[in-house]
């Protein structure tokens, strides 16, 4: 995240997890960043060629990865697409990545009354984007 937006360590709060889903720890970090420390924007940033999204697309089952991917699978399943729904299809993976970013934003609003209220009061913005690793550009959703 720091590299994408040319920021230094400590300039932004960053919570990373493969597949950019939210859990209690990440929500707590976001609440701390916004409510306590004054951050004004939450950016859910997916990226092209995401291995976690590809694994969720292919419904990989492997150790603790299975539970992790189960949090991404609903976003994959929500994509309306008639063609090849495998990780070999770049178009479908891109659509799944965008769907996952949108789902994560909704999960933040659903699972954090603090952040939802702050957004409602226009104290923060919750936005999403997809980072193109080939061009270095972020497409905001």
Image (cartoon, helix red, strand yellow):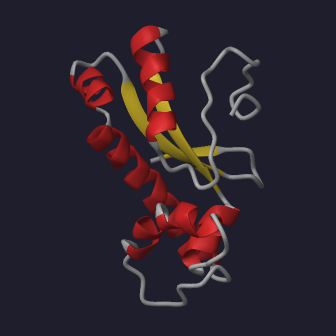
Q: Residue 103, percent across and down?
A: 39, 54
Q: Position of residue 59 (x, y in %)?
A: 56, 79
Q: Is residue 37 visible?
A: yes
Identify the residue at horizontal 44%, vertical 10% (top origin).
Answer: 36
The residue lying toward the viewer, choosing from 91 and 23, is 23
Side (left or right) of 37 relative to 19: left
Q: Which residue is rendered at x = 62% and y = 78% of the image? A: 60
Q: Quadrant of residue 52?
A: bottom right
Question: Residue 61, percent across and down?
Answer: 62, 78
User: From the viewer's perspective, is residue 32 above or below residue 91?
Assistant: above
**Left or right: where does residue 108 sit relative to residue 116?**
right
Q: Residue furthest bottom?
A: 83
Q: Residue furthest top?
A: 37
Q: How many numbered marks, from 0 up?
A: 0
With respect to residue 70, does 117 lie above or below? above
Q: Is 126 placed above or below 99 here?
A: above
User: Residue drawn 61% across and 43% down?
Assistant: 138
Can residue 49 be seen here? no
Along the line of sight, which residue is nearer the eye, 94 or 20? 20
Q: Quadrant of residue 3?
A: top right
Q: Residue farthest to the front?
A: 63
Q: Quadrant of the N terminus?
A: top right
For the point 57% across and 44% down, the residue is 45
> Image check: 17 left or right of 75?
right
Image coords of residue 93 (percent x, y): 58, 71
């Amino acid at each position: 995240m720091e590299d994408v937006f040319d920021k230094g360590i400590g300039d932004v709060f960053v919570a990373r997890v493969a597949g950019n889903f939210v859990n209690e720890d990440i929500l707590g970090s976001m609440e701390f960043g916004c409510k306590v420390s004054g951050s004004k924007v939450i950016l859910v940033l997916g990226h092209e060629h995401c291995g976690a999204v590809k694994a969720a697309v292919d419904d990989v089952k492997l150790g603790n990865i299975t539970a992790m991917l189960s949090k991404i699978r609903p976003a994959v399943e929500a994509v309306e697409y008639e063609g090849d729904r495998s990780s070999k299809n770049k178009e479908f993976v891109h659509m799944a990545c965008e769907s996952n970013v949108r789902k994560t934003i909704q999960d933040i609003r659903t699972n954090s009354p603090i952040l939802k209220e702050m957004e409602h009061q226009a104290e923060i913005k919750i936005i999403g984007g997809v980072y193109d690793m080939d061009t270095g550009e972020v497409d905001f959703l």
